[in-house]
Image (cartoon, rainbow, N blue to C red):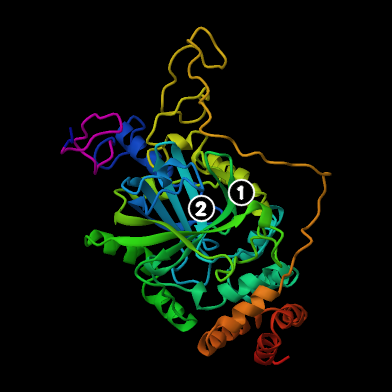
Amino acid sequence: MKKDYLTTNQGAPVTDDQNSLSVGERGPVLIKDHILLEKTAQFDRERIPERVVHAKGAGAHGYFKPYKNMANYTKADFLEDPLKETPIFVRFSIVVGSKGVADTVRDVRGFSIKFYTDEGNYDLVGNHIPVFFIRDAIKFPDLIHALKPDPVSNIPGDSSANSRFWDYISLTPEATNMLTYLFSDIGTIKSYRFIEGFSVNTYKWVNAKGKAVYVKYHWIPLGGIQSINSAEAKRLAGIDPDIASRDLFDTLASGKTVEYELFVQMIAIEDEDKFDFDPLDDTKLWPEDIIPLMPVGKIVLNKNPENFFAEVEQSAFCPATIVPGIDFSNDKILQGRIFSYTDTQRYRLGTNYLELPINRPKVPVNNNQQDGFMQIMPNHGSTNYYPNSLGDGLPKQALENGIPEKTYVEGYEVRKSISKKNDYVQAGERYCSLSSIEQDHLVSNIVESLSAAIKPIQERMLVHLIKANKEFGKRVSKGLNL
């Protein structure tokens, strides 16, 4: 029952929440004032570590419905019944910027969905740009260090920070394709309702017969795709730095919905060597004219969070959170994310972060994991081990649903990059696919940022841009007066 009066955290009534207990009205405050101590101590601990990346975000609840039964490709239960609505929670975010960054800053946007399925939670963790800077997770800490503010000045976007970014990028040819997206108008937005979403990583779908295919996910907003140019992004940053978060919240608060369609691209496992790029390379796009989009279903966002901290800030997503019928490929970024995301959530939220309501599956959880910081759910019974006979052998291992995929793995242990790099072709194709105005914006945005870097770094970066497209590189060179 909801109480209409103030209480302590233990539920005791509070008759005066505005005056500390003191010796007389002007004397020292007493340490026995447990209401003051509780209130202050709780306040002192309101903040938790912000995410290293994706720190600022906005979220919404809704549901997912498939268009048709996808059982030919995957045994995932939530993709089989077109009449079934699977509850979801979606978090949009800004990748590099801290919590106080403007929503319109040039950056990658996170687009992550938590499906509360009947077979457990499934997290689809993606971005609004289809490719990435690097192809191996071992490079990720260095990439983010280069993208973050200078550790000496802590000033983002100054000449030092820009030099650091371009220094790293100019020494990382595989990032060239990503630059053509990030520094185009796609890199600046004012609404989460009009951005695309991409898995970036390659996954596997596995059906009940054990047949697997490679898949990439693609979300398309039904309201259309919109972005803004650099000048508008800077203007809005000064007027309403939270414009994207506000727009999403206000739209749902008004009773409207926000909808996105889910598509997948598929490649047969046996066909992965048939392209001029490695399909498991996250710096590469799967061309839609060669690998077409297949419609899968739709998400409908229809409800705002009731408490931002409890639901948005404490929400935890991880690519390792999968369900039967969905599996990992040998995508090197994905392989690293499987560990990294769960590890950072345990640091940020605690060992038992999955017991928080926003992260908790809507189906029963039965295992022998126990205790740890802030355990909420009780352990049942004395047999916290498997196998056991004292507990009637429960919980027992689940029966296999269908035939598991047979994955053949053999080879020497090596630290070696992929042979089929092809770092420039798609970047050049991307430049040529843009309209003349979009090309102008891409060039001017790169020039504006790269001009803050020192000349040797500028010259090194130009080599990559020219290799992607001569006109592209020459226009940037002219803008830099080189």
| Foreground pick, 400 / 32 | 400
Quadrant in which the C terminus is drawn: bottom right
- Name the kind of residue labelled 1 in the image: Arg
Q: Position of residue 363 (x, y in %)?
A: 39, 33
Q: Residue at x 17, y 32 (%)?
A: 1
| Foreground pick, 389 / 443 | 389
> What's the magenta region?
4-21
Q: Which residue is mark 2?
A: 125
Q: Please determine whether, in this image, residue 449 is positioned above or below residue 273.
A: below
Q: Residue at x 78, y 57 (%)?
A: 417
Tell me where residue 380 sits by quadrant: top left
Q: Position of residue 261 (x, y in %)?
A: 40, 61
Q: Please determine whether, in this image, residue 394 is positioned above or below residue 292.
A: above
Numbered disc 2: secondary structure: strand
Q: Which mark is residue 289?
A: none
Q: Please determine whether, in this image, residue 28 is positioned above or below residue 422.
A: above
| Foreground pick, 333 / 433 | 433
Q: Position of residue 157 (x, y in %)?
A: 58, 73
Left or right, 334 with reference to 102:
right
Left or right, 46 with reference to 247:
right
Cα separation, mark 2 vs mark 1, equals 10 Å
Packing grade of label 1 (10 A; few <14, some 14-19, many >=20) is some
Q: Please determine whether, in this image, residue 147 is positioned above or below residue 1.
A: below
Mark sitting earlier along the chain (2/1): 2
Left or right, 436 with reference to 9:
right
| Foreground pick, 140 / 23 | 140
- Tell me if residue 449 can be seen: no
Numbered disc 1: secondary structure: helix
Q: Which residue is mark 1?
A: 337
Q: Position of residue 296 (x, y in %)?
A: 43, 56
